[in-house]
Image (spheres, helix red, strand yellow):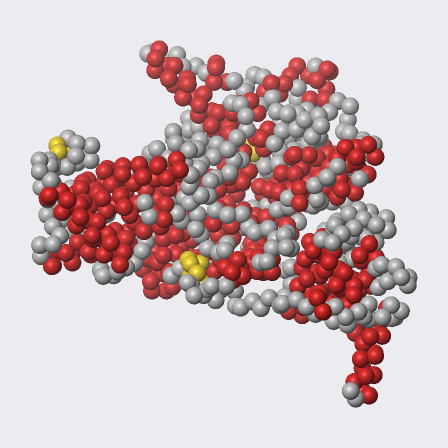
Amino acid sequence: MKRTTLVLLALCICLFSEGAEKDDLASLKPGAFFIDEVWAKVGELSCLKCHNSSGEAKDSGFILEETILLKGAKQQNIHAANFKAFSKMARKSKAGQQSRLLLKPIGELDHEGEQVLKPNSTGHNILEKFVARINGKADSSSTVKKYKPQPFFEGVTLLKGASLLRRLTLSLAGRLPTPHEKKAIETKGLSELDTILDQIMTEEAFYVRLKEGFNDIFLTDGYEGNGELILSYNHFEKSRLWYQKYNLSHIEDEKERKETFYAMTRDYRKAIRKEPLELIAYVVRNNKPFTEIMTADYIMVSPYSARGYGIFEQIKDRFKDPKDPFEYVPAQLPALRARNNNPINAPLVQESKTGFYPHAGLLSTFQYLRRYPTTDTNRNRLRARMYYRHFLGVDVMELADQVTDAAAIDAKYKTPWMEAADCVVCHRSVDPVAGLFQDFYNVEGHFGPRKDGWFEDMFAPGLEGDDLPKEERWRSLQWLAKRTAEDPRFAIAMTEHVWYILTGRMALRPPMNIDDPHFSARRRAYKMQRFEITKIASRFTQAEFNLKQIFKELAKSPFYQSDGINAAIGQSDRKAELHDLGVARLLAPEQLERKIEALFGARWGKLEKEIQILYGGIDSKSVTERLTEPSGAMGAIQRIMANDLSCLHVVADFALAPNKRRLFPNVEKNMVPGVIPITDLKIRKGIVHLHSYLLDRRVSVNHPEVDQTFKLFASVVKEAKKRKGIDKRETYHCGRIEGKLVDDPDYTLRAWRAVVTYLLRHQEFLYE
C-alpha cells in the first residue's frame, strides 16, 4: 500500500476516534446507512418527536430537524445537520464507557424521555452499528442493501379524459357527464377540467356530497338524543319546544293535524342537527375562506331552528320561505342568560363584551360540543383531542407510546399528567386546549362553567406554549379559532379531509414497524403522498383558502387519476409503494344509490333506508366508520340489488323509442342469437354499449369479456328453447307495461335481464 494511502487511512481513523475534535465532524457526510437506517428507522420515529426546536427536549442540546417534506439540497443540508448531532452523541464520553447514544434511548443516564427503545431491539442494534462506525470500528454486519426506487408512477395506468370526467361527475354530482362536458374534454383535454369542476361545484348535488363527506369526518349528525336537546333548558326554556305550542287549529281534520305536528317535529329536529354541515356548505358555496368554519361569528339557522333559539321574529325577513324548515341563513345568538336571572344560576350567565354569543365556527356550536361530551375525569380532553384531529390533522394519541404500567406511574406521581414524561408529552398539548372549552363543562354541550373555576392541576388554558390572555377569557374559543386559522397545519388537515372525500381512504400515516421488510417502500409511499398533500395545501392557502381549489388540484393529481398497475410490476417492494394509489373503494350506500339514479333514472330506494347500516353505512353514533370490504350480507344485498334493477329497467327500457333508451339504444327484443351473423353482431354491439354505459369499460365486439357475456345471453335463450311449457310472456313482477304483461316469445328480454344482472355485480359497478 502506498504511503499516501496509509496517511489518508490514518487520518480517517483519527476523525472517527474517541478524542477527535468537534470541528472534525464538519468534514463528515451522512451516507446511505445514516439516512436509510439511523435516521429513517430511529431518529425520525423515536427521537424527533421530543428532540426538536419546540419539543419536550428542546433544551437538551440534541436538536433534530424534519426531513420528510424536503428534497434536493435542502434535504441533504438537514441530513448533514442531523448526522452531526447523532455523531456527537455517538462519541464515547469516557474510555471504557458506552456511548450516550446507546444509553439514553434505553432510559439510562437520567433520560427524561425514559425508555424509547428496548435493548437488543432492531432500533437499538442500528444505533450500535452507527456508534461502531463513528468510533472507528469496522462492522461488516452493518452493510445495508440500499433500496433503489424507480420513478414513482412508472408502470401506473392513469385514467384518460372521458373516464376521469365520469369518475368526477358521479362522485361529486351524482350524475353522468353532459354532452357539452364530454366534448370539452375531448377537444381541449384536461385543461378544461377546472372550468367543468367550477360548474359542478355550483350544483346542489355537490353540496349534498360535501356535507355527507364532512359528516363522515366530524360526525355531528350523531349526537345522542333528539335534536332540540342541544338547547339548554336554562337558556332556551320558552323557545326550544316551540312546536308543542304551534297553532295548527286551521287544520280541521284531527288525523291530518297530528301528522302535521309529527312532521313538524321531525323536520325541526333534523334541521337543528344539520346546522354545522350547513355552515360548511355556506362557506364553500359563497367562496369564503374555509378558515371561516373556525372563525365564523355566526351559526346557520332555518325558520324552524331559529324558533328554537328564540330569534325567529328578529330574522324572519331574511328567509325566502319562512315555512321551509331547511332553508338556512347566518345569524348570531345573543349572549346566554340563565332563566329568571336567578343568582343561583349566576355561572350560567355568559360574559360578553359585544352582547352576542362568542361564536367560533364549528368549535362553539352546541352540536359539536354535544357530539364530543366531557366528564369529571375527562375534563374536556376528548374535545381537545378531536380539535387536534379535525382541524390540525394531529392524532395526539400518537405523540407518545402507551404507558405500560399505569399503576406504577400513579404511585410515583401525585399528578402524573403534569409530571410523568410518558404522560406530559400528550397532556402538555391536550390540557391547555381542554381549558379553552371550560365554559362548556357540561356533558350535554350546554354553556355551564365549572362553579369552582377551572382545574388548577392541569396545564393552563392556551395553545402550544401560548397561554390564554386574561382579557380573552370570555371568548376563549374565538382566540383558539383565530390561531388555528393561521396555523399551516390547518391547510394540510383540510386537504387530507378532501383527500378522504374523493378517495374514501385516510391519508397515509408514516410506517412505524421498522422490522417490516417493506419499510423503506412504505416510507417512500408515505413521503410521496405527503409531498402531494403539502403541495396542494400550499395552493389552497394561495387561493385564499377556497376549498374548491383542493378538489380541482386533487382531480389533476396522478394519485387520484391512477387506475391500475402494470402487471409487469412484480417486485414486492414496488407493490408496497403503490398499494394506496387511485380510487378503488366500495361505494357507500348513498353513493351507490346516486349512481343507480344517474344510470337508470331512478334510485333503488333501499340502500338509504332499512339496509343502509347493513350495507356498510354509518349512523354517526355507534357506527362511525364505513366498511371498505363487503361482508357476506353485503354480497347478498348486491345480488338482490342487481336482480331488482334488471327486473325494473330492462323491459321498461325496451318499451321506449330507441333514441330515448339508456340501456338498449341499438338492439331490439326480437334479435335472437345464432340465426343471422349480422344479428349476432348487433347483439355484441349492444353488449359493448352496456359495458361502456354501466361499467365505463371500453371494449371491442370481439373482446373476451364480450364473448363471455354473449355466451351468457345465448345460453339463456338456448336453455329456454329446450324447455316445454315456458310462458311466452315476461314475468309478472318484471314484465308489466301499463299493467299488462309483455310478450317475450324468444326469451330475449329475460336473457337481457340476465346480462344486466351479471354486469351489475361487477367490481366496476359496485366500486369507484
Q: What is the quadrant of residue 40 in the picture?
A: bottom right
From this view, report whether residue 197 is shown above or below residue 412.
Answer: below
Q: Nearer the viewer, residue 480 or 722?
A: 722
Which residue is most to the bottom? 2
Q: Is residue 504 left or right of residue 417?
A: left
From this view, report whether residue 55 is shown above or below residue 374.
Answer: below
From this view, report whether residue 664 is shown above or below residue 450.
Answer: below
Q: Nearer the viewer, residue 287 or 137?
A: 137
Where residue 8 appears, as percent x and y from the top left, is 80, 82
Residue 604 appears in the picture as rendered: yes
From this view, report whether residue 420 is shown above or below residue 258.
Answer: below
Q: Is residue 18 left or right of residue 508?
A: right
The quarter of the picture where the N terminus appears is: bottom right
Seen at 37% across and 17% down, the residue is 259
Q: Nearer the viewer, residue 308 or 506?
A: 506
Seen at 39% across and 56% down, the residue is 164
Q: What is the quadrant of residue 530 in the picture?
A: bottom right
Where residue 599 appears, as percent x and y from the top left, is 30, 45
Seen at 54% across and 19% down, the residue is 239
Residue 475 appears in the picture as rendered: no
Where residue 590 appears, as percent x and y from the top left, is 40, 39
Where residue 235 appears, as percent x and y from the top left, is 62, 20
